[in-house]
Structure formats: structure tokens, C-alpha cells
Image: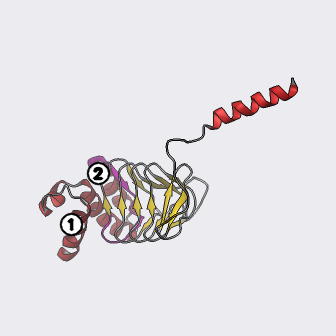
Amino acid sequence: MFNKMKEEIASIRERDPAIKSAWEVYFLYPSYKAIRAYRKAHKLYLRGKFFRARSISQRCLRKTGIEIHPGAKIGKNLFIDHGSGVVIGETAEIGDNCTIYQGVTLGGTGKDTGKRHPTLGDNVLVGAGAKVLGPFKVGDNSKIAANAVVLEEVPPNCTAVGVPARIVKRDGIRLEDLDQIHIPDPVAQQIEEIYKEIEKLK
């Protein structure tokens, strides 16, 4: 158990240059506290002690702002950076060495039963404010950009951006140029089409 704690603390320190010591992670980092609480709650959940498991997760939510359902399955060395507003649903699955930033939701759409939440492969990064919704997989080594809304499967080694999210990079090769300045205005385009129709009618 002590070795696992050391491994998790070391993995967090590797990914956050602001950390000055292991003690800082152990005593002060909400991410580490939330994951420790989740591990306890998950053991209770697997033994059918659902109320006690949920009480631990809800107490942790109040203390850290991170809500991890005790039914979720989480691999080793998860790092939730900053953490406020993170929600991880009951049937979500997270692989090893994943990084999740603040405001992320691994949730459902309300239309599925059974497996309702996403599965993240190993080494997945989910940017701040991103929403990954539905019972599909985000492949190993993929990245989800900040504020993206992912509604369908992301293959391994890809980068997904936008609302709804689309793949812009695969295996290190850019699939399309992402221009975040000259974005078309759909309302203006519709108005332009209406003007054209009016001119035709005239």
C-alpha cells in the first residue's frame, strides 16, 4: 500500500511543476485526497455497502469539489489537476496514467441504460471544461481539448476539439487546419441565405 501511495504521489509530481514536495501532494492536493477517498468508497461499493460508499464520495465532494461515483473503475496514477467541478459517473472507466483538468464531466446523455458513461484508455488527457458524454471509448494516448464536447468514440493517438468534438490530429499528423479566429457565423450565413431568397422573389 505504501508503495502504491509513493507511486501515485510521484506520478502527480511529474505532471505538475508547481509541486515543491511529496508532503504538499499528500496533505494539500484535492486530487490526491479525492482519489484516496474514491479507493475506500469503491471497496465498499464492491461489497454492496452502497450507502456508506456514497457517504464517503459525497463528503469528499464537499471537501474537494471533485465528485467520483464509487462505482466508477479507475486505474493507477490518475491525476486530476486543480479538480473543482470534476464529475465522474457510476459506469465510467479510466485507464492508467490519465490526466483530467478542472470542470471535466465524464457523464451520460440520459438516453442509455446499463453502461452509461465513457471509458478512457491509458494515458488520456482531458482538458479543462471538456464534457465526454456517452458509453463509448476514448482510445489510448488521446487528447481532448479544453471545453470540447465529445459525443462519439475517439480512436487511439488522436486529438479531438470543438463542439461537437471532431478529430483534428491522428498519430501525430494534423488532419485539418484548426482556425480559431475565422470561424464561420451560422446565424450570419442564414441571414445571407434569406436575403438571397428575397432577391429571387423580387
Q: Earlier in the sequence, mark 2 or mark 1?
A: 1
Above or below for 155 versus 111: below
Residue 114 falls left or right of residue 159: right
Q: Nearer the viewer, residue 54 or 63?
A: 63
x, y percent for residue 58: 34, 52
What amino acid type is highlighted by mark number 2?
Answer: His
x, y percent for residue 156: 49, 71
The N terminus - image quarter: bottom left
* Element carrying mark 1: helix
Badge 1: residue crowd in 10 Å (few <14, some 14–19, many ≥20): many
Q: Quadrant of residue 192?
A: top right
Q: Nearer the viewer, residue 60 or 80?
A: 80
Badge 2: residue crowd in 10 Å (few <14, some 14–19, many ≥20): some
User: Is 65 within the magenta?
Assistant: yes
Residue 9 falls left or right of residue 156: left
Count how many numbered circles sit on residues in the image. Answer: 2
Q: Quadrant of residue 182?
A: top right
* Element carrying mark 2: loop
Residue plotted at (61% across, 55% down): 111
Range of magenta residues:
62-78
User: Is 5 within the magenta?
Assistant: no
In the image, farthest residue toward the top? 202
Above or below for 126 versus 179: below
Task: Name the disc covering residue 82, or none.
Answer: 2
x, y percent for residue 171: 48, 70
Residue 195 falls left or right of residue 150: right
x, y percent for residue 98: 36, 66
In the image, farthest residue toward the right? 201
Q: Which residue is mark 1?
A: 9
What amino acid type is highlighted by mark number 1?
Answer: Ile
